[in-house]
Image (spheres, rainbow, N blue to C red):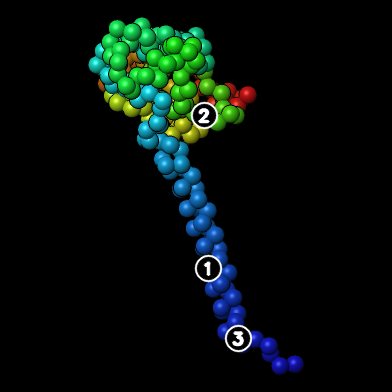
Amino acid sequence: MPQLFDRSFNYLSRISIIAIGVLVAAGVTAAAFIYRSPVIRGQQMVVEQPVPFSHEHHVAGLGIDCRFCHWSVEKSSFAGIPPTKVCMTCHSQVFTDAPMLEPVRESFRSDQPIQWVKVHDLAKFVYFNHSIHIAKGIGCNECHGRIDKMSLTFQESTLYMQWCLQCHREPERFVRPKDQVFNMAYQQPANQAELGKQLVQEYQIENKVNCSTCHH
């Protein structure tokens, strides 16, 4: 029986299989890279809000403490969004006619909350508790970055699981004295390694790396 294919067909077949494998691997790598890119995650991208609220102005400029607005952050899993009457504590006296604050005034008049857009929006299968992190000496800017310098708010960190696990595996690298938790300008001391180990023991911090810690 005559040979149907030339001998060179074997060589071409091998080359084709290798090429397909390379293309598949490249496609998977590209997809993983795109998925983890800041654009997909929303990292470093300003989130448009109903009112252009500036943390830089309110925190760094006016010296307002985080807890004035995020009043539940020390006792709840949620940091809390202030009701409009908190905003009007000041804005019934200052910038009373500013056009950009009209949504605030309308919210106050109608008793309807402002529909703020979440900046740090975790997946539904992830549980995060603000109060426990604060109680254990983890500063706000460890997750939120220097939000006191943000004229408009954006997500500083990736919030990926591997990013969270850095702290959960080695809390001594990130823990600080509790009275410095809300200090945005806090700088780790030269003896952070020693201080961190001391605080981990004092605050009874455990290396929580079990799945059930965050995935209930």
- Residue that mark 3 sits on: 7
* Quadrant placement of the N terminus: bottom right
Task: Using a 10 Å C-alpha cutoff, classify the residue at mark 1 as few (fewer than 14 neighbours), some (14 to 19) or many (20 or more).
Answer: few
Q: Residue at x 68, y 90 (%)?
A: 3
Residue 179 rendering spot, x and y as whole percentages? 35, 8
Q: Nearer the viewer, residue 95 or 141?
A: 95
Q: Dot 2: what SS?
A: loop
Amino acid residing under circle 2: Leu
Q: Nearer the viewer, residue 166 or 79?
A: 79
Q: Dot 3: what SS?
A: loop
Whichever of callouts 3 and 1 sits on the residue coming sooner in the sequence is: 3
Whichever of callouts 2 and 3 sits on the residue coming sooner in the sequence is: 3
* Number of the front mark, 1 or 2: 2
- Residue that mark 2 sits on: 122
- Residue that mark 1 sits on: 19
Q: Is residue 122 left or right of residue 102?
A: right
Q: Residue at x 51, y 56 (%)?
A: 27
Whichever of callouts 1 and 2 sits on the residue coming sooner in the sequence is: 1
Q: Is residue 87 left or right of residue 213?
A: left
Amino acid residing under circle 3: Arg
Residue 90 rendering spot, x and y as whole percentages? 32, 8
Image quadrant in which you'd find residue 92? top left
Can residue 98 be seen here? The reply is yes
